């Protein structure tokens, strides 16, 4: 996984080097850095969500600007999606009637994310360009832990549940923001992104859990 991540970073850097001779800051390829908090939550089909939890995302962002107002936007980030829930778990310990227990769970899941989105930009208005963004999120699992409190029973902390979480997560990205130009080749971008996960994140056959998050985005393009 580390080799794959390093290889993808080198690919981004190589593309950036070959695109730096663009005649306009809004054409060609632009590479940047991002670091921002996330507010995540989970939705089980058997149980309920228990509010939002803070996470973090950091890495590379890139815009392929094929016209002045339209871009293909992607990136390569390490993103933590946390969330709390109350779920009903069924177990069969050899008895004829399965038993059910209620758990309060805290998911702490980390992905390598590669978004594939279309970004629609306005013309510059007082050195600011506003944009909307829409596309697909692709997440590859790199770590997963969980806290669990059984009602009337034992509690566990930071249990490794990577084998119980699916390797791939897909989500729908909807976002909006603004890009502030501070020099000819440098700009700051900020905005909000809603990442709506639509694939089941668990390997369980008895229940379905999906996670979602809101990203408060900050980035710098060079």
Image: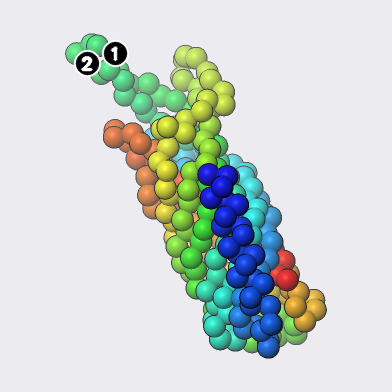
**Residue at the image point whose x is 69% and y is 61% from the top:** 33
Residue 47 to residue 78: above or below:
above
Report the residue that reaches farthest toward the right: 183
Disc ID at residue 169:
none
Is residue 1 visible to the viewer in this orientation of the structure?
A: yes
Q: Dot 1 corresponds to which residue?
A: 93
Q: Quadrant of residue 36?
A: bottom right
Q: Secondary structure at mark 2?
A: loop
**Residue at the image point whose x is 55% and y is 66% from the top:** 74
* Picture coordinates of residue 206, whole percent (x, y): 29, 33
Q: Secondary structure at mark 1?
A: loop
Of badges 2 and 1, nearer the viewer stands 1
**Residue at the image point whose x is 46% and y is 19% from the top:** 151
* Picture coordinates of residue 221, whole percent (x, y): 70, 70
Rate crowding at label 1 as few (under 14), some (14 to 19) or many (20 or more) other CA atoms within 10 Å. Answer: few
Q: Dot 2 corresponds to which residue?
A: 97
Of residues 206 and 169, the one nearer the viewer is 169
Of residues 33 and 207, the one nearer the viewer is 33
Query: In the shown orientation, is residue 102 left or right of residue 92?
Result: right
């Amino acid at each position: 996984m580390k080799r794959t991540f390093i290889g993808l970073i080198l690919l981004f850097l190589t593309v950036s080097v070959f695109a730096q001779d663009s005649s306009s800051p809004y054409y060609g390829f632009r590479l940047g850095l991002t670091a921002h908090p996330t507010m995540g939550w989970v939705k089980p089909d058997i149980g309920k969500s228990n509010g939002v939890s803070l996470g973090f995302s950091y890495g590379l962002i890139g815009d392929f600007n094929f016209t002045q107002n339209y871009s293909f936007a992607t990136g390569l980030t390490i993103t933590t999606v946390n969330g709390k829930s109350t779920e009903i778990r069924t177990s069969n310990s050899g008895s004829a009637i399965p038993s059910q227990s209620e758990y309060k769970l805290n998911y702490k899941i980390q992905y390598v994310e590669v978004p594939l989105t279309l970004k629609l930009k306005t013309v510059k208005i007082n050195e600011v360009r506003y944009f909307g963004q829409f596309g697909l999120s692709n997440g590859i699992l790199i770590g997963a832990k969980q806290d669990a409190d059984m009602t009337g029973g034992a509690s566990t902390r930071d249990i490794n549940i990577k084998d119980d979480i699916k390797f791939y997560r897909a989500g729908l990205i909807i976002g909006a923001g603004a890009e502030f130009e501070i020099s000819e080749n440098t700009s700051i971008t900020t905005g909000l992104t809603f990442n709506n996960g639509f694939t089941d994140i668990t390997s369980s056959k008895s229940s379905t859990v999906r996670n979602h998050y809101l990203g408060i985005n900050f980035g710098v393009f060079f």
